[in-house]
Image (cartoon, rainbow, N blue to C red):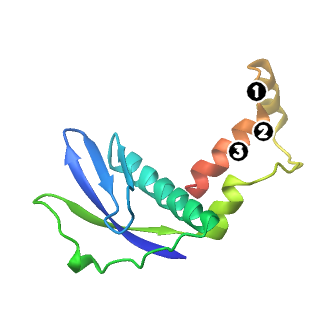
Amino acid sequence: MYLYYAIFSKEGHQYNVSFPDLDGAFTCGDDMNDALYMAKDLLEGWLLVAENEGDEIPPASEPESIQTEKGDLIVPIQADLKLAREKHESKLIKKTLTIPQYLNDIAVSYNVNFSQTLTEALKDKLGV
């Protein structure tokens, strides 16, 4: 488990995100929620690449030592590389489930992809 601090700088409605401890680690988001998602995704990706390449992973700075501009936010971002690796290298598994028939009938009439819908709902419910 890794914990790094990101600097969130608001520019208009957008947030720019940087990780001062990670060389070249910059991203942005359309709003705070999007910026948080992008920051976590960037941190996981940066660390996974470093690990795969055998690069040294720098220690995280303490938040009080990070230089910021007025209005910037320092936000802790956590990355579980075991989970991130599983997410990026995941294989599909088959699940059997039970739903009410009326929902099935409506979904079939709308050509709903059940696997895609369940995957999206689980990601939303679990925040991943």
Image quadrant holding the N terminus, namely bottom right
Going 44% across and 74% down the picture, which residue do you hit? Answer: 3
Between label 1 and label 3, give the one nearer the viewer.
3
- Within 10 Å of disc 3 (Cα), the crowding (few <14, some 14-19, many 20+) is few
Going 73% across and 19% down the picture, which residue do you hit? Answer: 110
Check disc 1 and report its element: helix, strand or loop.
Answer: helix
Which residue matches tag 2?
115
Spot occupied by residue 2 in the image (x, y as percentages of width and height): 50, 75
Which residue matches tag 3?
119
Image quadrant holding the C terminus, namely bottom right
Going 82% across and 48% down the picture, which residue do you hit? Answer: 92
Alpha carbon distance from label 1 to label 2: 12 Å
Compare marks 1 and 3 and give the one earlier in the sequence: 1
Between label 1 and label 2, give the one nearer the viewer.
2
Q: Eyeballing the image, is 115 above or below 105?
A: below
Q: Are marks 3 and 2 in contact (CB under 8 Å)?
A: yes
Q: Nearer the viewer, residue 128 or 24?
A: 24
Spot occupied by residue 84 in the image (x, y as percentages of width and height): 62, 61
Going 55% across and 55% down the picture, which residue do you hit? Answer: 127
Residue 107's label in the rendered image is: 1
